[in-house]
Amino acid sequence: MPHATASDGVRLYWEERGSGPTVLLTPYWAMHPSVFDPIEAVLEGEFRVVRFDERGTGQSDRVGPYDMGTGVSDLETVCEAVGGVAAAVCLVDAANRAVRVADTRPELVDVVICIGSAPFGVGALRNSDSLLASEAVVGAYLQQLEADYRGAVRAALSGANTQLDEEQVKERVQIQMEYIDAEAASMRARAWAGDSEAVEPANRIGDRMHICLSETLGGSGTWFPSAAELVAVANELFPNAGQSFVPDGIVSAPEESAAVVAEVIARRQAEISAGAGPLSSA
């Protein structure tokens, strides 16, 4: 099984399927990788699809630290090991790390595709009706992660996946607990919540960032903002980024999101062929 070795010696597990331009499915702060299974099954027919476990999770070494800078360095290490990626597909805080690598090492990450999110901390959502817009709610949740990890994971999973029944939520919570522990999850969540510095590198990569939003995303009283709320934030913070809309998310309707990924990569490769700049080695 392949591993990349970080600068401090931590081994980072990664795996690949399919062939073609490389697409990296980038993990977010407390995600079990099975959330990517549906979209991977679609993408691997056309692309080389790479997934990896961040430090402290899965088959990677269970060693910190878990701050944003270390996460960026680890992502760079994995991208070097796999030979660069045509696109990093990101959820939540994964985008915050990926835009930094795409900015400083464009030969490693050419395009960043944000699914249902964009690279900012929760402070950017101040005008949203979602729970993430409330500093008090977010602060209480971060404290719960440290004091009652299982309960916090359950609250997040059930709130963000209203289509799941009781047994499905219980099963997801259990595999989540086995995949990542409380320390790694809580420290990554805190790093993301307070991160306001990803906006500048995201703007420097310009239209090499693409935001894909689901029409059914979030809304008032849920954890995540609605697509309309995110569009308003994205238009303000990232005026040069591309945008797409799909009927549903990567679990319920992976074909639509996969089509966006394929379209963005094809367009970027056409730009490179026309002399628009260096594509990654993927």
Image (spheres, rainbow, N blue to C red):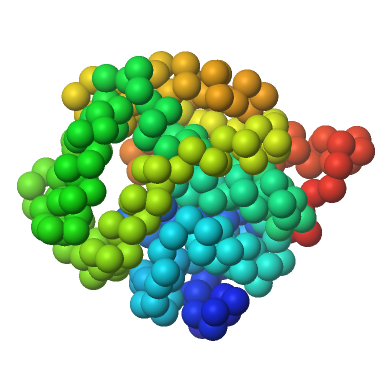
Q: State the residue lying farthest toward the left.
A: 166
From the viewer's perspective, is 29 left or right of 266? left
From the viewer's perspective, is 244 left or right of 127? right
Residue 98's place in the image compared with 257, above or below, is below
Instruction: Report whether residue 185 is seen.
Output: yes
Query: Which of the 4 quarters of the picture holds residue 18?
Result: bottom right
From the viewer's perspective, is 118 left or right of 172? right
Q: Quadrant of the C terminus?
A: bottom right
Q: Position of residue 108 (x, y in %)?
A: 71, 57
Give the residue at x 54% y 31%: 211
Give the residue at x 59% y 67%: 78
Instruction: Report whether residue 223 is seen.
Output: no
Query: Which of the 4 quarters of the picture holds residue 247?
Result: top left
Judging depth in this view, the residue of 120 and 107 nearest the camera is 120
Give the residue at x 54% y 51%: 97
Residue 180's place in the image compared with 61, above or below, is above
Residue 34's place in the image compared with 115, above or below, is below
Q: Position of residue 161 (x, y in %)?
A: 23, 40
Q: Position of residue 206 (x, y in %)?
A: 69, 32
Q: State the residue lying farthest toward the right.
A: 275
Judging depth in this view, the residue of 58 and 274 nearest the camera is 58
Q: How many marks?
A: 0
Judging depth in this view, the residue of 203 and 12 nearest the camera is 203
Give the residue at x 62% y 68%: 77
